[in-house]
Image: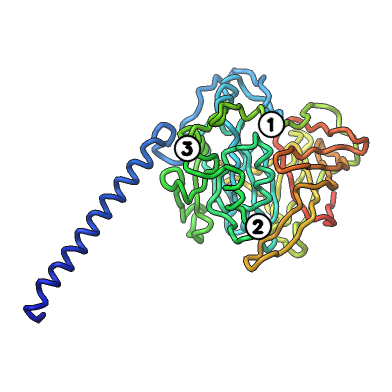
Amino acid sequence: MLPAALRPKLFLLVAGLGLYLLTTGIAFAAFNFLRTEPQSEFANPLPGEGGGLAIDPGEPKTESCPLNGKLYTKTEKKAWETRRPLVVMIENHSEARPQSGITKADIVYEAVAEGGITRFLAVYLCDAVARDTMLGPVRSARTYFLDWASEYGLTPLYVHVGGANLPGPANALGQIQEYGWGGRNGNDLNQFAIGYPTFWRDYERIGHTVATEHTMYTTTEKLWGEGKRRGWTNKDLKGIDWQDQFQSWKLEEKETEGPEANKVSFEFWQGGEEYAVTWEYNSQSKDYARLNNGQAHTDLNNGEQIKSRVVIVQFLNENGPIDELKHILYKTISSGKALVFQDGKMTEANWQKISRKARTVFTGKNGKELTFAPGKIWIEILPTGNTVDY
């Protein structure tokens, strides 16, 4: 038995510990209640493809998406005109496939994150407004993706889960603060600062348990809702519309000239078959269907194969690994070569980006800006010197 002299001390210790746990629990519950309450306007009670716009099936598609020129209804345009682009980091680790929501992106960038493993920057504005779209797995920020994200109105809603933060040129989290995106009411939607119910984890997302890094999910409506709560709609905190700071590419239906390119294949890194990409052209639908590692690359939400009207292979100088975490860098603010695939044809091109905030412009051999066919656009970032078969 405990000596009588020590019993009062034990009582005080236990009582103090109990009081601490009680007050901590109350504070945690209060914090979560206060933090999530403002999101109720947009958050769906069930995650996934819920809700949506009431669109008359007979309503004509006459309105051009400002990102890629694809046509939508006036109802959809009315919705996207009150919003700004979501740019979302989605991983492409072989164990994370199939991803959710890729087929609803208007534009997608793909580049290596580390070790030959690619990552997507998916841009959402037009195709995702009709229905709330589940997105994932969401992953961490990388500095070169920030440069491309900056092309969508300078301050898009940038969505990620943490990011590279070692001191030096790969410090993406530091750059987010430097660009003025961070803070409680910033346009940076970092899961570390937001949490549930805007973000949640699904360990059984593909029918079996996956590692934690492949589990983070969100939805388009929850993200746009968080942006609105912070004051970021189509206008920023100063009342400036994002389109006033956006340079569109030239988008028009016209005949494409050049050698035939019905099948386009490439690797990002030599020997990286798991991330090798093939795009196969369908002359009936006038788009390219994507394969990853020889398999049809599908969207978990709807089972559809990922397709794109335009595929751009952009060659950039790659540097790295530059630190102990194997981060790499791409020279985004520069110029170089590109191959543009549309309508089953290939066009040789040059590209130039003069600053972080400037649009990447693609020009033909005559020096004039290229015109892209209206529709989904994929930009594939390859190291300079890589081979593309078509």
Tell me the distance, in whole angstroms, between the alpha carbons under discs 1 and 2.
Answer: 26 Å
Pointer 1: residues within 10 angstroms few (<14), some, or many (20+)? some
Task: Say what amino acid the circle numbered 2 marks.
Answer: Ala
In percent of width and height, residue 198 lies at 45, 43
According to the picture, the residue beneath numbered tag 3 turns out to be 226
Instruction: Look at the picture and state if 265 lies above or below 302.
Output: below
Numbered badge on residue 104: none
Q: Which residue is rendered at x = 45% and y = 34% of the image?
A: 229
Instruction: Find disc 1 in the rendering and name its residue.
Output: 246
Q: Is residue 53 left or right of residue 142?
A: left
Q: Callout 1, which amino acid?
A: Phe
Q: Residue at x 65, y 59 (%)?
A: 168
**Residue at horizontal 72%, vertical 31%?**
247
Instruction: Check residue 170 in the rendering and tell me which mark sits there, or answer none.
Output: 2
> SS class of the residue under badge 3?
helix
SS category of the residue bearing label 2: loop
